[in-house]
Image (spheres, rainbow, N blue to C red):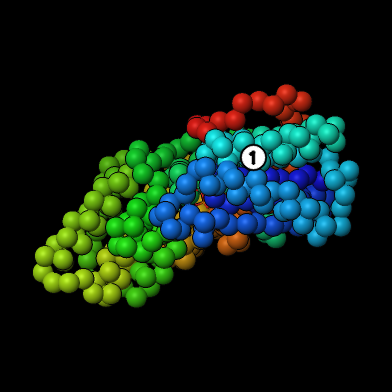
Amino acid sequence: MLVLGIESSCDETGVALYSTQQGLLADALFSQVELHEVYGGVVPELASRDHLRRLTPLVRQVMKKAGHQLSDLDAVAYTAGPGLIGALLTGASLARALAFALEIPALGVHHMEGHLLAPLLEKSPPKFPFVALLVSGGHTQLIQVEAIGEYQLLGESVDDAAGEAFDKTAKLLNLGYPGGPRLAKLAEQGNPERFKFPRPMTNRPGLDFSFSGLKTHTLTCVRDLQNQAELSEQDLADVAWAFQDAVVDTLVIKCKRALKQTGYKRLVIAGGVSANTELRQRLEKTLQGMGGEVFYPALQYCTDNGAMIALAGALRLEAGQSDGALFPALKPRWP
Ligand code: KG4
Ligand code: ZN
């Protein structure tokens, strides 16, 4: 079966073609980063308009790359939420219109299910069951995954998501947008011995997270430094290191706890922050020490992309699920 996947929930237009027999056949992505950079964050109306401009050419490009016609498609999957409503509408409308015209099923996919399943695109995918750490700009969640569609939330952030904390802290350090990768890059030059930031919510039981206090802690630290002298590049790098160290360490502690609680030996990390090198390395080391294994998507499938949506749609189609011909409401917020 051939499934076209469309992602348009935020500032990335992603389209991909997935075959249940041959795997990922083609994918294309257009990132709107430059469009939003001057505003220091995503402007929803600009995002929707740009998705409209890019979607159809990207679909054509993907079909051509894979050597297929639209008439070969068996289903169209699209992100139905959570995300920006206008942005979601562009991809969903195209997907629904295509499915209607081709008389094939359409499937609305939960964006986070897409992220969670993205490691299954890899050559050696994780076997079920596993614990998944989903770390993106909007979510930080630990999930017990028994099978496709069988997800149990073990814990989540009570305030900012890890990616959001990276972005807000980067803004505070004047690193611009998108902040996460820039802060991570700067942290490489940091001195690990200089500052030690707190590891929020690790000294009590449970699997929830809280990252908003770390942002405030960073702000206080920066202000203290500014009161002494003008901030140097090295100061900024040292602060960036301490912040990243605290986030990564907190995530590692909670992952260990979740693995212990479930008795599982496989950990999947996905979502934008799973691109973070420090996080990957420390989790690998941790899992090695526990006799387990860690799985993550290739870098281009950590952040938003069409491949994960095509894959999630294909797996749901194989499981006999589809949404019917009506256009169900999109869910900008979707627990
Ligand atoms: O999954 P994603 O592309 O979009 C959402 O669904 O939110 O995640 C984007 C988030 C942003 O907050 C971004 O700063 C963060 O992932 N991110 C990183 C890195 N690459 C992306 N955070 C830390 N280190 C990175 N290397
Ligand atoms: Zn995402």
Most extreme residue toward the left is 228
On the question of residue 319 being in view, the answer is no
Residue drawn at 31 percent across, 40 percent down: 205
261 lies left or right of 226: right
Q: Answer yes or no: disc 1 within 8 Å of ligand 2.
A: no
Please state the horizontal and vertical placement of residue 134, each as a whole percent of the image: 50, 47
Quadrant where the N terminus sits is top right
**Residue at which label 1 appears:** 90
Indicate the secondary structure of the residue bearing disc 1.
helix
Q: Residues within 10 Å of mark 1 (few under 14, many from 20)?
A: many
- Residue 329 versus residue 18 in the image, above or below: above
On the question of residue 58 being in view, the answer is yes
Residue drawn at 73 percent across, 24 percent down: 326
Please state the horizontal and vertical placement of residue 129, each as a whole percent of the image: 60, 44
- Residue 237 versus residue 119 in the image, above or below: below
Front in this rendered view, residue 294 or 170 = 170
Residue drawn at 30 percent across, 62 percent down: 173
Total count of labels: 1
Residue drawn at 21 percent across, 71 percent down: 231
**In the image, what residue type sits under mark 1?**
Thr
Please state the horizontal and vertical placement of residue 49, each as a whole percent of the image: 59, 45
Image-quadrant location for residue 110: top right
Please state the horizontal and vertical placement of residue 292, each as a whole percent of the image: 53, 57
Front in this rendered view, residue 72 or 193 = 72
Image-quadrant location for residue 103: top right
